[in-house]
Amino acid sequence: MKLQRYGTIACLALAATLGLSACGSDNNEPASGASASGSAAAVDCATGTLNAQGSSAQKNAMAEWIKAYQQKCQGTTINYEASGSGAGIQAFIAGTADFAGSDSALKPEEQPQADAKCVGGKAIHLPMVIGPVAVAYNVSGVDNLQLKPATLAKIFAGKVTKWDDATIKADNPDAKLPATTIQTVHRSDESGTTDNFTKYLSKTAESDWTLGNAKAWKAPGGTGAKGSDGVASRVKGADGSIGYMEWSFAENAGLKMSKIGNGNGEFAALTAEAAGKTIAGAAIEGQGDDLKLKIDYNTKEAGAYPIVLATYEIVCSKGLAADKLKLVKGLLGHAASAEGQASLTELGYAPLPETVRTKVETAVKNLS
């Protein structure tokens, strides 16, 4: 599988950076002699039961972390329901989820409700998963498509309707573009992926994308499909189609992915490293251990792939129930570790850059 190739590259790069002697494997055993500060340190085991829910974008990452943690720590039961970001937040507020996964930060009206569940503390955002959003296409005879933000906005807004349109030709002067009608494919269900994709369009091509951002698709025309798997399937089955989806679904479907123009004037291909560069340049909007990010979709970082989403774990900084605290810290501590992050690339995610990962790791250690 192609993702294995990316996983090996990212893992080797991470190992070189941190001085590790080995990369993560299926058994997720820690590297020999690794230190607790940025490596595959021993997991802090606890017993008991955790119930969490939320973002479906991080479902596979959470499943990997839970599997690895339970293999090392007997006597634990950890349930994560991919119910969607909004449902996860509401479950956290209602007290039925010990933490929530969310592709978006708490809304201003949700923050005080979530804080009320944290005795003596606040609900904080811990970015744990980088989910690159691929723009995949199926156009006969076109193998190296590249699109500027304005071009992408015009395509999905229905302003550019043919593949040989002059706007697309300007981005691809050496390509032989057919006169095929463009078929855009979007999510039919509400999705954090849609929210972040439209946020990217609204921030980088506001004159061509005037619909703002939302979890529900608002643009006219196009074809809706449920889930990223549905979008990938629809794109694969129709010549002339283009759609947005989480990276892993584009890879698994064997789809071609467009290079995307960034603020540095480059067309960047989607790789784990390129997506990580955009997150590394994100500003932290929260205070203290609240690591809510503001992503610069117009990033001028060389080689950065700009369409990324950060999915959070929303958890109490203080006030966690005594029988949950150690288990929450153990699981999220593993997720934030270099080992936990290195395991993600094979699943279609990008590891957190070290500048962000170490802050998340410290914030987890501070939970009380």
Image (cartoon, rainbow, N blue to C red):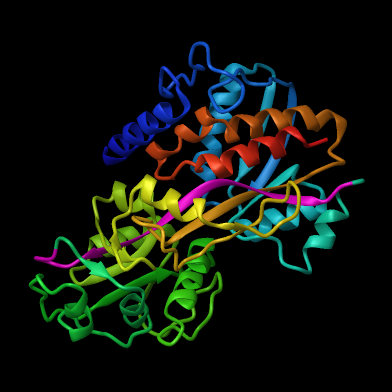
Rendering quarter of residue 346:
top left
In percent of width and height, residue 187 lies at 44, 67
Q: Which residue is at 54% across, 25% downward?
A: 39
Residue 149 sits above or below residue 271 on the image: below
Q: Which residue is at 12% across, 81% downward?
A: 179
Report the residue that reaches farthest toward the right: 120
Seen from the viewer's position, the closer of residues 180 and 30 is 30
Disc count in the image? 0
The quarter of the image holding the N terminus is: top left
Seen from the viewer's position, the closer of residues 63 and 346 is 346
* Residue 303 counted in the magenta span: no
Rendering quarter of residue 80:
top right
Magenta stretch, residue numbers: 121-142
Q: Which residue is at 86% across, 50% downward?
A: 117
Seen from the viewer's position, the closer of residues 337 and 21 is 21
In percent of width and height, residue 157 lies at 38, 83
Left or right side of 1 for 220: right
In percent of width and height, residue 220 lies at 41, 85
* Residue 136 counted in the magenta span: yes
Rendering quarter of residue 259:
bottom left
Q: Which residue is at 36% across, 29% downward?
A: 12
Q: Main secondary structure of the magenta part?
A: strand
In percent of width and height, residue 15 lies at 42, 27
Left or right side of 335 for 274: left
